[in-house]
Image (cartoon, rainbow, N blue to C red):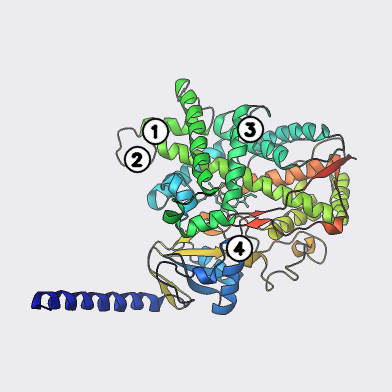
């Protein structure tokens, strides 16, 4: 070996040593976890068909704060109420970044609210909250829209005439129409091709993201990009959705009157025009399309899925269903639809809805977070940019917070005098700076829809109630209920 080759070899050796020293120093400040393999990470300890169980199992071994390698990505996992609350609530600012989530990120490219970071996220979130509020979110005017839509839903349900049916589609159409009316200015007719397409695309993507394919894509996005499978449909569906929203935006542009905005899109277009000269503005076509997509996606599938879980639980526990109906009859009667102001007088119904959300645990692993600066946490130092998974499932099933977490039991949200009792570990909408932006709308929809349905109908399973399986069909982004049919008996 000549002297030049020796020098290169020595230099390479020195660089490798330096890299190992630096990386072990960084690792030394991170929580412990299973030893990763190069490139594969902790693939051997993780099962993409049940990532939640794998991560929960590791927390039993390594504690409530540990490090895991999802493929080549290093992530810190938090489990149990205490650790998740300390991060999202007590150190909310530090943990407010959005972590990598390839199934979404490869479509949104960091535009929109849900998958952006830094100034862009702050500006778009503040703007969207303000506009949604102006259009009535959390106020009486949105209640009126929900009640109107509830009436359309009841009319559809009456058409089933006691025959068995799958409620997925009819619920999604109705729920989606509420957010559509805020975004696009008016509700769609239930047979409108655009509404049917929106629901089909969102439903399909939520299913793929909640399947092993979705989880696998999140682990190895570049590799999976080359492999055929249903995950490829994700991006076709996203593309179709984007085209559909772009078409609606174009219609709005043609008839825009900035002095009298009709909906969210008009407000966004007006803001775009105001900031046209600002090269740093966050208001442009891509952020408009992605923000609208985030609201549509967030506002459709989560509420529809929760309602399906609720139907299943109410059929499995007919006594719970009957007690909710008694409360409705007692507080509201049959002459008018239930309204939000009835909720305070309906502690049992409120407790049942909370218990459905806790037990169903619709987004079990939350969306990934990221620390926005070097962050001291429980004796460790998480370097800026570290992705963090907060297992909401382990909060909702934390035995230190709920007496019998594995049981569906509305008593979890009732005190000794049967008044409604809040729980700090109720986090289906997450907590802290990234708290779900649609929480107040979703809570209104769940209460008004469920009480309207139970006021008019009893839900009846096709088989024996005790045979109903409440465990999710698959779990990934979402906990999907098993498919089912039911019959409605008019009361
Ligand atoms: C039962 C219904 C719902 C559930 C369980 C739910 C759950 C969640 C969760 C767990 C997150 C992630 C929070 C985090 O990163 O810490 C989230 C974020 C979000 N949700 Fe919801 N959601 C629901 C309904 C809605 C509705 C109706 C809308 C639309 C109006 C919506 C829009 C959003 C948006 C835009 C974000 C991103 C917030 C951000 O990154 O700043 N969600 N939701």
Name the residue located 45 percent from the left edge and 21 percent from the top edge: 254
Contact? badges 2 and 1 (CB < 8 Å): yes
Contact between labelled residues 2 and 3, with CB atoms less than 8 Å apart: no
User: Mark 2 = which residue?
Assistant: 281
Residue sitting farthest toward the top: 255
4 or 3: mark nearer the eye? 4
Q: Nearer the viewer, mark 1 or mark 3?
A: 3
- The residue at which mark 4 appears reads as 50
Q: Are marks 4 and 3 in contact (CB under 8 Å)?
A: no
| Quadrant in the picture for residue 299 | top right
Q: Is mark 4 within 8 Å of ligand 1?
A: no
Alpha-carbon distance for marks 2 and 4?
Answer: 41 Å
Mark 2 Cβ inside 8 Å of ligand 1:
no
In the rendered image, residue 85, in percent from the top left (x then y), is placed at: 56, 67
Residue at numbered disc 3:
196
Label 1, secondary structure: give it.
Answer: helix
Q: Label 2, secondary structure: give it.
A: loop
Mark 4 secondary-structure assignment: helix
Q: Is residue 173 shown left or right of residue 16? A: right
Q: Is residue 136 visible?
A: no
Q: Position of residue 315 (x, y in %)?
A: 83, 52
Q: Pointer 1: what residue?
A: 272
Q: Position of residue 338 (x, y in %)?
A: 79, 41
- N-terminal of the pair, mark 3 or mark 2, is 3
Q: Along the horizontal axis of the image, is 90 left or right of 465?
A: left
């Amino acid at each position: 070996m000549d002297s030049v080759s020796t020098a290169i070899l020595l230099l390479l050796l020195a660089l490798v040593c330096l890299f190992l020293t630096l990386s072990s120093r960084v690792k030394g400040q991170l929580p412990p976890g299973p030893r990763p393999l190069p490139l594969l990470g902790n693939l051997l300890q993780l099962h993409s068909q049940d990532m939640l169980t794998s991560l929960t199992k590791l927390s039993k071994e390594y504690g409530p704060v540990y490090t895991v390698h999802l493929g080549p990505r290093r992530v810190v996992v938090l489990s149990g109420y205490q650790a998740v609350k300390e991060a999202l609530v007590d150190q909310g600012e530090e943990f407010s970044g959005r972590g990598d989530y390839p199934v979404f990120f490869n479509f949104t490219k960091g535009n929109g609210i849900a998958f952006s970071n830094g100034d862009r996220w702050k500006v778009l979130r503040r703007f969207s909250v303000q506009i949604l509020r102006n259009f009535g979110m959390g106020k009486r005017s949105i209640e009126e829209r929900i009640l109107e839509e509830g009436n359309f839903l009841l009319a559809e349900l009456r058409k089933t005439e006691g025959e068995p049916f799958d409620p997925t589609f009819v619920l999604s159409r109705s729920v989606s129409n509420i957010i559509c009316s805020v975004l696009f200015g008016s509700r769609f007719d239930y047979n409108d091709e655009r509404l049917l397409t929106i629901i089909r695309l969102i439903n399909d993507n939520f299913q793929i993201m909640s399947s092993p394919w979705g989880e696998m894509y999140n682990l190895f996005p570049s590799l999976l990009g080359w492999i055929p499978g249903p995950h490829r449909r994700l991006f076709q569906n996203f593309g179709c959705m984007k085209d559909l929203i772009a078409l609606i935006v174009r219609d709005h542009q043609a008839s825009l009157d900035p002095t009298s905005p009709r909906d969210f899109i008009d407000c966004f277009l007006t803001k775009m025009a105001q900031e046209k000269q600002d090269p740093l503005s966050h208001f442009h076509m891509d952020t408009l399309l992605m923000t609208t997509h985030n609201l549509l996606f967030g506002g459709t599938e989560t509420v529809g899925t929760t309602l399906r879980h609720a139907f299943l639980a109410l059929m499995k526990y007919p006594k719970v269903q009957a007690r909710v109906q008694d409360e409705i009859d007692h507080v509201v009667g049959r002459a008018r639809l239930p309204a939000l102001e009835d909720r305070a007088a309906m502690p049992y119904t409120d407790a049942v809805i909370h218990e459905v959300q806790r037990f169903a645990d619709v987004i079990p692993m939350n969306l990934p977070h990221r620390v926005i600066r070097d962050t001291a946490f429980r004796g460790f130092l998480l370097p800026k940019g570290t992705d963090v998974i907060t297992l909401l499932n382990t909060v909702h099933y934390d035995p230190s917070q709920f007496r019998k977490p594995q049981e569906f039991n509305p008593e979890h949200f009732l005190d000794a005098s049967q008044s409604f009792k809040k729980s700090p570990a109720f986090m289906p909408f997450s907590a802290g700076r990234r708290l779900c932006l649609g929480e107040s709308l979703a809570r209104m929809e769940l209460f008004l829809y469920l009480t309207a349905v139970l006021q008019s109908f009893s839900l009846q399973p096709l088989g024996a109630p005790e045979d109903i399986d409440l465990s999710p069909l698959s779990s990934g982004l979402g906990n999907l209920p098993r498919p089912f049919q039911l019959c409605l008996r008019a009361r």
